[in-house]
Amino acid sequence: MIKFLVPDIYLNSVYDLDLELLKKKNIKGILIDLDNTLLPWNSSRIDEKMTEWLLNAKKMGFKFCIISNNRASRIKECAEKLGIPAVEGIAFKPAKRVYIKGMKILGTEKEQTAVIGDQLFTDILGAKRLGLFAILVRPLVEKEFFFTRFMRRIEAKILKRVLKKESDKN
Ligand SMILES: [Mg+2]
C-alpha cells in the first residue's frame, strides 16, 4: 500500500512545477485537483496568477481536466470559470474510474498523463494505482473540513517516513 502513496514529485505549489520536465517525460495531459490545489478550499475566487499559469501551460501544449470530490455544482462553476473540463460526478477519488474518465476527456494514455493534487489518500493514491505520474503539492490554505484535517495529520506522518526512506536511498 505505501508504494501507492509515494508521489513522483513533491512541490510547494503548482508554480514550482517544471513544465519542461513534464514535456520531456512526454506528458500531454494533466488531471488536476480543485480544492487547495487550484483554488483555496471551498472558495470560488480564482487567483490571477493561477489563471496565467494555466494559460501558459496550455500554450505549451498541456491539456487539463479537473478531478474533484466536491459538489457537482461547485465543480461545474469552477471548471467554467477556469475554462477547463471536469470529470462529472461518477465516483470519488481515489476510485480508478475518475482517472480513467479524465484520461478519456484529455485523450491521453496512462504514460502521457500526470496528476496534480494536495492529498495523498485521494489524488496520489488514485494516480499511483493506475501508474500515472503523481505530483503532490502543499495545500493552498489550511482551513478545511475536519475529516480532511484529520487525514492530513496521518499524511504528514507517512510523508515524513517516505521522504526519510527516499533520502536514505540517495
Ligand atoms: Mg484538494
Image: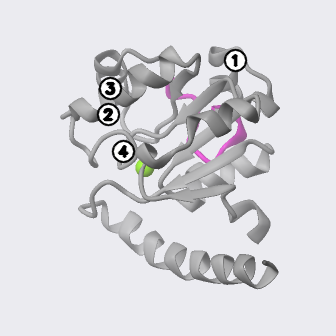
Say which amino acid is labelled 1: Lys
The magenta span reads 88-98
Task: Please identify, in this view, whether the residue under mark 1 or under mark 3 is nearer the observer.
Answer: 3
- Give the percent coordinates (x, y) of residue 3: 78, 66
Element type where label 4 sits in the image: loop
Q: CA distance from mark 2 to mark 3?
A: 5 Å
Question: Marks 4/2: CA distance?
Answer: 13 Å
Which residue is pictured at 66% across the width and 43% down the height? Answer: 95
Dot 4 or dot 3, earlier in sequence:
4
- Tell me which label, 4 or 2, sits earlier in the chain: 4
Find out whether the residues at labels 1 and 4 contact each other: C-beta distance under 8 Å.
no
Residue depth check, mark 1 versus mark 2: number of the one nearer the observer? 2
The residue wearing badge 4 is 35
Residues 99 and 63: in front is: 63
Ligand 1 closer than 8 Å to the CB at disc 4? yes
- N-terminal label among 1 and 4: 4
Residue underneath mark 1: 104
Which kind of residue does numbered mark 3 sit on?
A: Glu
Reply yes or no: does residue 100 show up in magenta. no
The percent position of residue 13, horizontal first and vertical second, equals 41, 51
Q: Quadrant of residue 130?
A: top right
- Which residue in the protein does label 2 denote? 50
Distance of mark 1 from mark 2, alpha carbons?
24 Å
Residue 33 placement (x, y as % from top left): 47, 40
- Which disc, if any, is residue 52? 3
